[in-house]
Amino acid sequence: SIVGSKEIFFAVVSTTITLVAIFFPIVFLEGMTGRLFREFSIVISGAVIISTFVALSFVPMLSSKMLKSGRKKSKFYNKTEVIFEGMNRFYKNTLKSFLIKKWLVFPVVILSGILIVVLWNVIPDEMAPLEDRSQITIRSSAPEGATYEFIRDYTDRISDIADSVAYDKESNITMIRGGWAMVRLVLPDMRERERSQMEIADELSAAVRNENAARAFVQQQSTFGGRRAGMPIQYVLQAPNIEKLQEHIPLFLDRMNASPYFQMADVDLKFTKPETRIIIDRDKAALLGVSTRDIGQTLQYALSGQRMGYFYMNGKQYQILGEINRQQRNTPVDLRTIYIKNNTGDMIQMDNLVKLEESVAPPQLYRYNRFNSATMTAALAPGYSLGEGLEEMDRIANEVLDDTFRTALEGESRNFRESSSSLLFAFGLAILLIFLVMAAQFESFKDPFVIMFTVPLALFGALVFMWVFGITMNIYSQIGIIMLIGLVTKNGILIVEFANQRQSAGLLKKDAIIEAAIQRLRPILMTSISTVLGLLPLALATGEGANGRIAMGTAVIGGLLISTLLTLYLIPAMYIYLSTDRKVAQKKVYRPTDKVY
């Protein structure tokens, strides 16, 4: 027990520090990612540290008490040992054959890198996968100026479609307000119906598409947004003035409506409020001896009800508001009844000094970071992810907007971009920490570099499984990939550390890595298979919240399986190319026997 513990002590400690270094950056992430996975990373790190203490203290003690060297082998051992010995011989022969052509490691690594780039761009990305929450919302928007009766009749038809498609729903809630309506369907519990929420939503989308009297789309509640999350696409346009927005919003909206990525495109800044603007003829006013200040002040007192003072009656205070009677200020011709005194004391009729201009203005103005702003919103068309939608919005912005505009994100779109950048930062920091920790432990930069070749192999495996099983790149799968780094570097540490021990014992570098790989085959397979079996419940999860667990489980299992298989061959080859030759200078060089234990 003591000899075995000393042999694996360095590898166990290195693996523990590596796993803790993986989860350490997640603790300090901000935003949605930090709130979701901070406790997860703390629990995993604590469990790994405690398990290391147990592995180096209690396990050797229990082994010395429970495992006896002279004990008779059981029938199960005798039958299974033949299989394991055959597996060792097969691995030894194939490894030696591969090392004869060890240059193949470079094409394999390069090909893996190319496929990583391709798959990373092919796999759609989103904030989080949709979960079955037993709720579907059908939102509809009527044309400008539509009557209440028109919207009500259209909503009744949409409600009838919902009744025919979602025949097993429990309730139907309809709301109509202004120019829009909403039909909310509450479905039975997912265990009590045959179809999933997503299948029902797809059928509803195809059905309401035929109702073209108004615009309607089917919306499913996002995983993190809640009921008030709004549209998944929320793209903010910032301009130096309102005229710029008025000029470019129609062009931007037309491009969104023409894009296959979106449905139900809309904007919050609408120029729909009619107004009459009073334009002062400055030249004429100057000629008649009237200042623009006097004109503005007169119009203000006459039309806007300015407070002139207070008076008291029956112990109560009342405001004195000065303005013309409503009947005398309802039409443009009423300006003729307003007179203003010029600098010579003559009374000038107001309609001689101003002209009226009819226009439209937004009912409400919006500002974002002190800029005039408009938020473009849209729902995603079926088959498109949030990441693809935002890329399309960026493309439209580059084509439509000029250099005076700025853009920003809000809502779910903003959370998605922030979480993606945070996780990429955590991924890069985790790799850097692992490399530095291993460099300090191995007292070399070459051995950690060899071990780090397991990372692209794991990433390749994770992306392959995600692509095959239709898993998106979301917050759960990204956390799974980060966790995968620590799991796969363990295999490289086991092989490289033991190969260094064999070199120190006098073996040549090639012989040392072959013996180390064979001796560590069983521990690597045992830990990898046990981890895969432990993650299977995640990958095969059902019920509420299953899609997030499936994403994480699939990414980790895929990366672990493929990286384990490739690591057993590629790490020995890279070790021969890159590692330092540590053989002891002795007259007689020790060589291992052909017997495999």
Image: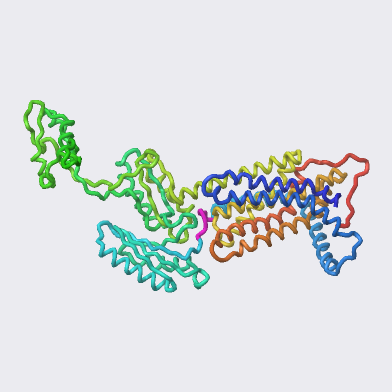
Residue furthest to the right in view is 587
Residue at 37% across, 64% down: 183
Quarter occupied by residue 290: top left
Quick check: can you spot residue 304?
no
Q: Magenta residues: mostly which secondary structure? A: loop
Residue 567: give x, y in percent of width and height. 72, 53
Residue 409: give x, y in percent of width and height. 43, 46
Residue furthest to the left in view is 346
Residue furthest to the front in view is 315
Residue 486: give x, y in percent of width and height. 67, 49
336 vs 58, nearest the viewer: 58
Residue 348's place in the image compared with 272, above or below, is: above
- Side of 354 relative to 420 (left or right): left
Residue furthest to the top in view is 344
**Where, quadrant-wise, is the C terminus in this rendering?**
bottom right
Quarter occupied by residue 62: bottom right
Q: Which residues are magenta?
A: 123-130
Residue 311's place in the image compared with 15, above or below, is: above
- Residue 129 magenta: yes
- Side of 161 relative to 334 (left or right): right
229 vs 217, nearest the viewer: 229
Residue 194: give x, y in percent of width and height. 50, 73
- Residue 410 magenta: no
